[in-house]
Image (cartoon, grey):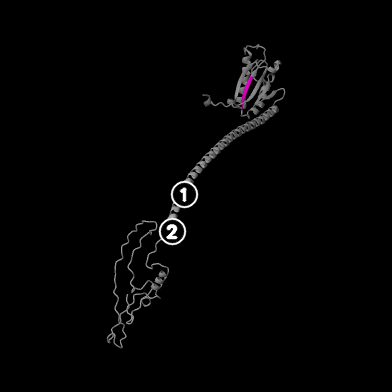
Amino acid sequence: MFPPTPEPHPTAPGTPGSFAPSFEAPPTTISAPPVMAPAVHTSPDAPLYAPPEFPAPSPYAPPYGGSPSQDWAAPGPASGPSHAPSPDSLLGRAAARSKSQGEDPYATETLPAGRLERVRRRGRLGWLLATLGFAALIGGAALANKERERLLALQSQQQDAVDAAQARVAAAESRAAEEARKFATLEAEIAAKDTATSADQKLIADLKEQLTEKDGEIESAGKEVSVSLVDDVMFPSGKAELSLGGYRVLARVGKILKGVEDKQIIIGGHTDNRPVKRSDFPTNWELSSARAVNVVRYLVEEVGLDPTRVSAAAYSQYRPRSKNLARNRRIEVLLTPIVKVDRKAAR
């Protein structure tokens, strides 16, 4: 940019009264910048790059940060054209500072040899640090893998110990459960025995209320209760038909037996060892059997006992109680616990 050209005065230039400045516009040259080429490093002191060479700036172009009014002065007719920048302008001050430091103000900065060596050392140090860091990383990874394997092995050992402890606990719990089951079964058996004992005691007490010493004897052994009825009260001598006293005794005893539901009732006929003299019964087997059957029929038909729980048995003279013949002749009412047979399991 150039300052505006004033309009020409009617008075010719150089004549008195002319106030218009007389000067010629400086020629403007525009040239293309040179192409940058990579520098070839031939020595350690060679610069890292080759700065391009630009043509010197035109003294008529305003420097950076300036303006035509500050950095360019139009030559007057007395002095003529001047290409030197003003000392007070930015370009002049920069040029003066560069000259005082012994530098070319238009030269590109280069690296000194010492600084270049420091840069190279820093580069080698960086590579060394990177190599050491990579080696440390690999070593750290190896140590981490070993530590991981150690922890996994320790975890496996601890898990095995836990599994073994759990197995022992499970076995102990199983044994405790089995012992508890046995204890519960034993308690149930004891309770059942206590209940049975209580029931048997009540049964014995009830029978004693219905019988006198002349009628017979009551005995208990374990879970069995035996009632022995005297032969002289039950039957006439040598006969199998019930006497009037026999009916009365069986009526009282049958009322008690009818309330017993957890026992089997066996009616046994017993005789002494004397042979039968009458022809109605060839032997004591027939006599003891006939007497037992008549008692069963009366209890079932007249008293109303359950026939599935009553049976008759003949023992003749072969289960004597003593040497007393009168005590051996008897009807024995045996109450024994009912044994449940699993027929499917028996098959």
Q: Which numbered disc flags the more N-terminal residue, 2 or 1?
A: 2
Query: Where is the N terminus found, in terms of image quarters?
Result: bottom left
Residue 122: say if magenta: no
Amino acid tagged 1:
Leu
Task: From the viewer's side, name the closer residue of 311 and 161.
Answer: 161
Find the residue positioned furthest to the bottom.
Answer: 17
Task: From the viewer's side, name the closer residue of 120 and 96.
Answer: 96
Answer with left or right where residue 41 lies relative to residue 179.
left
Q: Secondary structure at mark 2?
A: helix
Which label sits on residue 48? none
Image location of residue 197, percent across then percent down: 66, 30
Which label sits on residue 132? 1
Say above or below: 199 vs 98: above
Question: According to the image, label 2 marks what residue?
Answer: 114
> Which class describes the residues within 10 Å of circle 1: few (<14), some (14-19), or many (20+)?
few
Q: What residue range appears in magenta?
A: 263-268
